[in-house]
Amino acid sequence: MMMSTKLVSFQLIIIFTFFCSLLRLSYLEVSGISFANATVMVGYEAAEDEDIEAISALLKWKANLDNQSQAFLSSWSTFTCPCKWKGIVCDESNSVSTVNVSNFGLKGTLLSLNFPSFHKLLNLDVSHNFFYGSIPHQIGNMSRISQLKMDHNLFNGFIPPTIGMLTNLVILDLSSNNLSGAIPSTIRNLTNLEQLILFKNILSGPIPEELGRLHSLTIIKLLKNDFSGSIPSSIGDLANLRTLQLSRNKLHGSIPSTLGNLTNLNELSMSRNKLSGSIPASVGNLVYLQKLHLAENELSGPIPSTFRNLTNLTFLLLHMNNLSGSFSTAISNLTNLINLQLSSNHFTGPLPQHIFGGSLLYFAANKNHFIGPIPTSLKNCSSLVRLNLAENMLTGNISNDFGVYPNLNYIDLSSNCLYGHLSSNWAKSHDLIGLMISYNSLSGAIPPELGQAPKLQKLELSSNHLTGKIPKELGNLTSLTQLSISNNKLSGNIPIEIGSLKQLHRLDLATNDLSGSIPKQLGGLLSLIHLNLSHNKFMESIPSEFSQLQFLQDLDLSGNFLNGKIPAALGKLKVLEMLNLSHNSLSGSIPCNFKHMLSLTNVDISNNQLEGAIPNSPAFLKAPFEALEKNKRLCGNASGLEPCPLSHNPNGEKRKVIMLALFISLGALLLIVFVIGVSLYIHWQRARKIKKQDTEEQIQDLFSIWHYDGKIVYENIIEATNDFDDKYLIGEGGFGCVYKAILPSGQIVAVKKLEAEVDNEVRNFKAFTSEVQALTEIKHRHIVKLYGFCAHRHYCFLVYEFLEGGSLDKVLNNDTHAVKFDWNKRVNVVKGVANALYHMHHGCSPPIVHRDISSKNVLIDLEFEARISDFGTAKILNHNSRNLSSFAGTYGYAAPELAYTMEVNEKCDVFSFGVLCLEIIMGNHPGDLISSMCSPSSRPVTSNLLLKDVLDQRLPLPMMPVAKVVVLIAKVAFACLNERPLSRPTMEDVYNMFVMHKSPLMKETLDTIALGQLQNH
């Protein structure tokens, strides 16, 4: 009896437990957790109702993120304990206390996250992801939250006023987003807040006075926004403040003297505003201050003497203000300074001779009114890295007063009154990148030892009294971008070694006593923008090699003894803006192709012996008479010149002779064509009978390999590839495999074996061969040569030229090859592909559309010249009908309209070209960038991205002039990616922009230009 009673009791317990479980499961079902998956929650010991509510909210939020994000959160499952989820931390009672998904790569919004469900949450960190949209107002319901980090995302809209409900908040970080509007006044309720970090948004309005109530604040970072108004004096009440960053806003008015109360401050940053008035003396109270940034404002008056108290200061940036007075002796006490910037002010008097300790790295006092010698104490600054004292009135012997610094990499002493000799010891600074001492009174020779500074990029020694020859050792400075030694007393020839400076952008040797001929090696300086050799004693002719300087904008050869004719090759300088050939002994006529130099705006050819008509271009027609005078017999429709008489046209007789020769040649050609035509007709009649007999045999064995003996080459290819063995395989595509074959002659070809068998119908096969044959008629240096095809009963293959560099995608995907693929080479590849597509679309009749422009179908030779390949999907257009076709191409490159239309036109290639351009300058496929540009939610953030940040990071940023062309490539690429085909440019437009430079290049630099500017330009 007792046993049966115990059994009944045990059964009742089991039934009661099961009943309770059902109730719990019903609640979970309502909360969003399925009945099937909720069993694990029954086993979760601490699953109180509010805990389950929080877990349910996290699972629902995960389900609303994109698929890739859900994969990153794979551990978030009802089959595992939430305390073991990645990014989740639980407290001692197993309740979720921290959600930290920072740097998870998540993408989505916070709209589906039920914030009221987090009753016990203390920390929420979603930083460094791709969350977009607004911050929900419900965020104010997390009553216990102490840390809220949402920085480095794509959030936009306003900061919700409900943020003031989070009264336990200690850290609020919303930086690096796209938030706008004002800081809500409810922030005054966050009395426990220690860190307010809102930098790099587009927040506006005044900085709230209410911040002065938050006495727990230790960090305020509001830089890089659009805040306006004055700095509230109430900030001076924040006695615990250690960091105050207000730079890069639109603040105006004076600096409040109350900031002197912030005695615990380590950093005070207010640069790049519109602050005015004097620097308050109370700043001297900030004895713990290490960084003081007040640059780029409108501050005036002297440096307060109280600065002597700032002995912990390491950074003092006061440049670009209106500060005046003598160099304050108070700064002499600041022996811990690392960076001292005083440039572009109105300081006067001498630089103190004993002002620096041994820690100074950067010192700039240029563009002031300092006098006297360079401080001797600089000799003790062995740590000095950059020194700029240019544009003052400093005096003294530079040979004696200037030391040798092992770490110094930048010296600018230009526009002073210094004298003495250049020291050969400066070359001992292995990291020297800039030496500028122009506009002084230096004498003596240029020391050859300067050629031992391998990193030197700028050498400016113009307007001194230097003598002797230009050292040939300067040719070793292969990093040099600027060489300016004009207005000296240098003599001798230009060393041909200067032609080795391939990175040179500016070469200025004007106003010296240089003689001899101009070295043709200067034509190899392909990066040159500015070339000035004027006012020397150069003789002989202008080198025709100058035509290779395709980026040259200014060319000045005036004031020499140059003779002979102006080379017609100079007409190839398509971006040349200024040309000065005056005061020489040039003769003959001006080349007629100068009329195609559309960028030319200023020209001076006076004081020569030129004759004939001036070119019919604005630069010559609008030139003042002074720029054309004192020549032999110039004529034309320009000011001061007589019209050219038609009857006395010196070229008339030549034209008559040419026309006569042309008529004779045409007559002979017509006769030859007639004879050949008759012969071919007779031959065709004979061959017609034979062809009928051999039709059946031809179906089984058709081949044609142009430029070769068909049967012999067929056998050679089979032998060279060992019957298409895999060891000769060099690539695979959607239509076949590509093999490398070495013919008995030693010639290497690429053989593409098609997968499809030869069509049994002769008529269809002829259509195929006709299309292939049409492609062989494209004679263009940027299209791969198709030697022929072979259609055999066993094989069907195409024979192409072989390119050693392989495909562009393999170059970009290999870090070693990508580094060698520098910006000059990338620009040339883009131009090459543009040139080829322009020829296919506008130079062929009928036009040819490739339909599969991608990095895998652009081949590279050893010189990094591009060839478009793989015309397996190419289509010859018929403009008299709609060109319909099934989808062809590579996903990620194909135009979006091909998803819903079968019509093919040139704009399909234009879109693919835009993708290819971005891939070349970014180093990888721009799929994510294009997607974010098309997404309304993420477009604003993408538009604010700087171009320099999306360029291939494996290369250093491009230097001028290549940087200009890279900007143009990006601009053209975005235009080609327009979703509306009609709004895309034609390849003729693109060709004109790249090759003819008809489109003006943008003025912005890579440091400032954003993607949004390129899209809207």
Image (cartoon, rainbow, N blue to C red):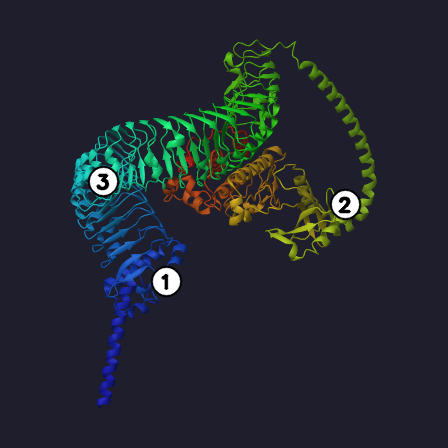
Q: List x then y, in percent, for residue 745.
A: 74, 47
Contact between marks 3 and 1 (CB within 8 A): the answer is: no
Mark 2 neighbour class, 10 Å CA radius: few under 14, some 14 to 19, many 20 or more:
few
Q: Residue at x 54, y 27 (%)?
A: 574
- Camera-nearest residue between 202 and 322: 322
Check disc 3 and give the amino acid type: Leu
Q: According to the image, label 2 marks what residue?
A: 709
Mark 3 lies on a secondary structure that is: loop
Mark 3 neighbour class, 10 Å CA radius: few under 14, some 14 to 19, many 20 or more:
many
Check disc 1 and give the amino acid type: Ser
Q: Earlier in the sequence, mark 1 or mark 2?
A: 1
Contact between marks 3 and 2 (CB within 8 A): the answer is: no
The disc placed on residue 190 is none
Q: Earlier in the sequence, mark 3 or mark 1?
A: 1
Between marks 3 and 2 in the image, the one whose residue lies nearer the viewer = 3
- Camera-nearest residue between 90 and 484: 484
> Label 3 to label 1, Cα distance in Å?
53 Å
Q: Earlier in the sequence, mark 3 or mark 2?
A: 3
Location of the C terminus (image quadrant): top left
Mark 2 lies on a secondary structure that is: loop
Q: List x then y, in percent, for residue 780.
A: 63, 36
Q: Residue at x 38, y 33 (%)?
A: 402
**On screen, residue 613 above or below 115:** above
Location of the N terminus (image quadrant): bottom left
The disc placed on residue 310 is 3
**On screen, residue 975 above or below 760:** above
Mark 1 lies on a secondary structure that is: loop
> Label 1 to label 2, Cα distance in Å?
66 Å
Mark 1 neighbour class, 10 Å CA radius: few under 14, some 14 to 19, many 20 or more:
some
Contact between marks 1 and 2 (CB within 8 A): the answer is: no
Q: According to the image, label 1 marks what residue?
A: 75
